[in-house]
Amino acid sequence: MKAGSNRIEAVVTDVVAVNELVKRFHFERPDGGILPTFSGGAHIVVEMRDDGRTRLNPYSLMSSPLDTRDYTISVRRDDVGRGGSLFMHSRVKPGQSMVISNPVNLFSLDLRAKKHLMIAGGIGITPFVAQTSQLAGEGGNFELHYSCRSDALATYADVLKQRHGRRIHVYRDDHDEKLDLPRLLAGQPLGTHLYVCGPAGMITWVRNTAAAAGWPAETVHYEHFAAPQPGKPFDVTLAVSGIGIRVGEHESLLEAIEAAGLDPPYLCRGGVCGQCETNVISSDGKFLHNDHWLSEEEHRSGCKIMPCVSRFEGKSLVLER
Amino acid sequence: MGINFKKETFRDDYSFKNSPEQVRRFPFPFHEDGYMYSVNIEPHVGGRTGTVFEHLFDVDEHYVSEMQDRAMVLAEDPLRCQSLPHMTLAGWDTLELLMTEKAKSYPEHFSLTRDGDKWHWINRPLGIDDHFTFGDTSTLPYGPLEYITRQSQGDFAVLDQRDNNLWMDAGIVTTQADWSLDFDIGMNFFEWHAPVPLAHELGIFTRALKFLMAMQQGQPARRLNWTMTINPRLDTSPENFHKWGTDRATVTPENVGQKVHLRVEVQMFFRLPRSNALLFPIRCYLIKMDELVSSAKWGRRFHRVLRDLPDELAEYKGLVRYRPTVVEWLSKRDDGKPTSSGYGPD
C-alpha cells in the first residue's frame, strides 16, 4: 500500500495574515461535509501546483480536533527556503481548490500522562494549539511554555491565553524573558510527560536538560520541523527504474523522484518517519544527511539516504529505486 | 435483503453449522497448495459482493448466536474485556467506527442518528434502542468498547502507539485461538508475540511492526490467519482449556467431517482518529470438514497444506495429536488433480 495516497479535495475558505511572518489557511470540503476526525499533533500534507512542479509540504493541524468542519494550518514565511511557504503566502487565495492528505499523527499525546507539559518555540506552537483544545475538552491537565521573539511575533499567544488562561506562559526574547527550564522540570509531578516543538536547537536543549534531570526518554516527546533545505543541483541514477534524474536547487530528492513518475512511500516528508528510506547502490561524493531517522552509523556508511530531506554533492549517486 | 439470523450454539450440543451460502463465502486462507508465514497484509477495502469482504465489518447468519455466546463468556469471566484508563478515548473511537460502518453497510438492521454529541443507536437483531451522549461513559450501560463489541462479531484488541511500539492496552477477547487478553494486557508487540515460532528469525515481526506503526487513518488493512478447532467452539481460551483441551483426543476417522473445523481469522487494522491508537479486530470463521470438502478444490488444497505443514507450525497451532487422522480423511477426498490459483471455491 502506498502511504499518503488518500487525498482529500478541499477548498481554501479563508487566508488570514496573523502577523508579518505567519498566515493561517482554512480548508473545507467543497460540499461543506465534515473532514476526518484527527488527534492533536497530527499534520496534513498540502499539495502545491507551482508552474508544473508539485510540492508536498507537511503542516500541523491547529484547529480543534473536536470540530472538523474545517482544518486550519499556519505557515511561516521562509524567504530563503525552497519556496513552499512563499507559494502558500503569495499564491494561495480564498476560493482556491487544493488537495490535502488525510491527517497523520507522528507527535501524539501520551494519554497515560498525569500532566502534559508543553514547550513551544516560534511556529512550533501550531500542534500545541490543537493538543490544548483536545485536552481542555476532556478536562486534561496541561501547561504550555511558549518562547517567541516579540509580542508582534507571538503567534496565537493571545488566543491561547484567552482559551486557557494561566496554563499558558509566554517568554519574549526582546524583553529578555527566558524559560528557566531546569527549575520548571524540577517542579513537575510524577507522571508528567514533556513535549517540545520548535527549532532544532531548542529541541536539543530541552531533551538534554530533561535527560540531565533524570527524565526517562519515554516521557519526552518532540517533533522536528525539518523542512528540506535547498542546495546545489545533483544527478542521480534510479537503478530499478533505469532512469536518470536531476535534483534541482529548490527541489528535494523525493520530489525529483516523484516528478520522474515514481511513487515511493512517505508520511512526514521531514526526515523523521522512515517511510521513504532508500538504499544506496553506489556513490562517489558527499552525502548531506539532514534526517533524524537514520543512525549516525548509517549516515557514515553511505548505504542509505532519506530522500525527503537529504542531498548529495559529487560525481555519481545510484539508488535502489 | 435481510440476513437470516440462525439460532445455534457454540458449546454443549454444538448446533452450529453453515448454510450452503455461508460456505460459499467462507474466507478460505490458502491461495496455493502450501503454507508458510508471510506478512500477507493487503488493503482492507469493501466491495466484493458475495464475500466476507463486501463490508468493512461483516455481519453474517451467526451474528445473534455469537453475541449470545459472548454474553455467556463475559458473565462467567468479566476480565475478558479490559481497558486501561488511558484507553477510554480509543473505546469511543471504536464505538464510532463500528456504529457508523454497521449503519452504512446494513441499514435494515442497524441505525445511527447523530445530533452533535447526542446519539441514537438502534440494533434490531439484538433488540437494542439506546440514546446516549458521545464521550460521556455514564450514559452507556458499559464502557464504550464493551458496549459496542458486545454487538460486534469477532475479538477486538486496541493497541496504544507510543515509544516506537504498540501496546495491548484494551480489548475484548472471547472467540480466540488460545490466547488471553488478561495475560497479554499491557504487553508490547514483541512481548505478546514471543511464543510464535520461526517468525522472529524471519524478521517478520520487526517488519510488521514498522508497517503497523505507519498505518494511516482511512486506509485500513487486513490479513488472514488460520488454525483448527475440534467442535465449533468459539471460546478456545487458555482460561477454559480444561473444557476444550481434551476434545483434541476425541477425533476419529468417523467423526472428522463433523467434529474438525478449519478456523480462519480475518485480522484487520484501523488507525483510530482521536486516540491515534490502532484497532485490531480479529474475526473468527469456522467451517466443518464436511462443509469444506463441498468445494473439491478446497478439499484438495487443504489436504496438501495440512500434510506438508512444518512440524513447528503444527505444534504451535496445537494440531499434532489429530493431524494424521485428518490428513488421512482428507487424502481420500484428494484425487491429485491440480488446483486453480486463488482462494475461491471454483
Image (tube, rainbow, N blue to C red):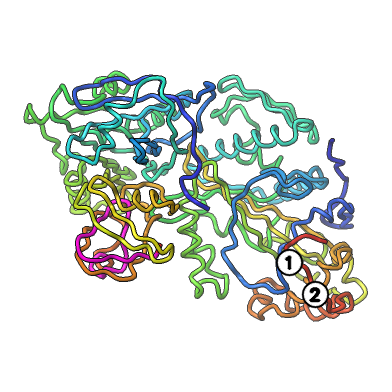
- Identify which residue is drawn at 24% across, 54% down: A290
Q: Residues within 10 Å of mark 1 (few under 14, many from 20)?
A: few
**Which dot marks residue B341?**
1
Give the residue type at disc 1. Ser
User: Which chain contains the residue that carries disc 2?
Assistant: B
Does the segment drawn in magenta span residue A319?
Answer: yes
Seen from the viewer's position, the closer of residues A244 and A215 is A244
- Above or below — where is B336 with respect to A131? below
Q: Is residue B330 magenta?
A: no
Q: Position of residue A285 (x, y in %)?
A: 20, 66
The magenta stretch is A299-320
Q: Nearer the viewer, residue B172 or A232?
A: A232
Label disc, if present, on residue B338 of the rendered structure: 2
The one of A102 and B311 positioned closer to us in this rendering: A102
Circle 1 sits in a helix, a strand or a loop, which is it? loop
Q: Who's the residue at 62% across and 59% down the image?
A: B180
Do callouts 1 and 2 point to residues on the same chain?
Answer: yes
Does dot 2 land on a helix, a strand or a loop?
loop
Quarter-of-image position of residue A296: bottom left
